[in-house]
Amino acid sequence: MTKSIISTNKAPQAIGTYSQAVKVNDTVYLSGQIPLVPETMEIVGGDISIQITQVFDNLKAVAEASGGNFFDIVKLNVFLTDLSHFPIVNEIMGKYFEQPYPARAAIGVAALPKDAKVEMDAVMIIREEYPI
């Protein structure tokens, strides 16, 4: 088993006892990202669509630092403090992902770190060739 820790300054630094991502062989586990601006470590201002976009940008930065991209994501978890925002997640996700889409879960939660309204984590499989 080959295990490595992934870190990039293009995404927010960990605000706790975790890594931005951990790669084990060809699988990458991306930690949850909230809408923090990497340079300031503050929640991005604006409405929920701006926060969702920031989360996707943060995940993208970690995915790329891992040697992959959004095509490599096989599982995406979306945590929302208000599930009525889910259609906005779908709309914005369509700008970042192409078919075949990853498996996904949307979970309503009471609260998120730093009073964020959205958080996402993911699992990626990085391979040289894809059978699909």
Image: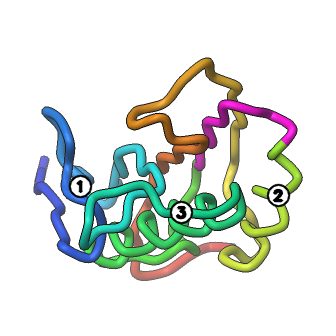
Q: Where is residue 3 in the image (x, y as percent from the top left)?
A: 12, 51
Which element carries disc 3, helix, strand or loop?
Answer: loop
Query: Which is in the foreground here, disc 1 or disc 3?
Result: 3
Q: Residue at x 51, y 69 (%)?
A: 72
* 46 left or right, relative to 119: right
Residue under label 1: 23
Please state which of the two labelled residues, at mark 2 or mark 1, is closer to the viewer: 2
Quarter of the rendering containing residue 88: bottom right
Location of the C terminus (image quadrant): bottom right
Q: Name the residue under label 2.
A: 88
- Residue 104: numbered disc: none
Crowdedness near tag 1: few (<14), some (14–19) or many (≥20) residues, C-alpha within 10 Å: many
> Please, is residue 63 above or below residue 110 in the view?
below
The residue under the point 45% across, 72% down is 60
Label 2's element?
helix
Q: Position of residue 124 (x, y in %)?
A: 45, 58
Which label's residue is closer to the chain start, 1 or 3? 1
Binning the other alpha carbons within 10 Å of mark 2 as few (below 14), some (14 to 19) or many (20 upward) gives: some
Disc 1 to disc 3, how far (Cα)?
32 Å
Q: In this figure, which residue is indicated by the disc labeled 3?
A: 45
Of residues 24 and 30, which is closer to you in this image?
30
In the rendered image, the vertical position of residue 96 relative to residue 14, given as above or below: below
Which amino acid type is shown beneath numbered disc 1?
Lys
Q: What residue type is labelled 2?
A: Ile
Residue in the picture at 53% in, 62% down: 45
Would you place residue 97 above or below residue 104 in this image? below
Mark toward the viewer: 3 or 2:
3
Magenta range: 76-84
N-terminal of the pair, mark 2 or mark 1, is 1
Counting every numbered tag in the picture gives 3
Q: How is the image coloured?
A: rainbow
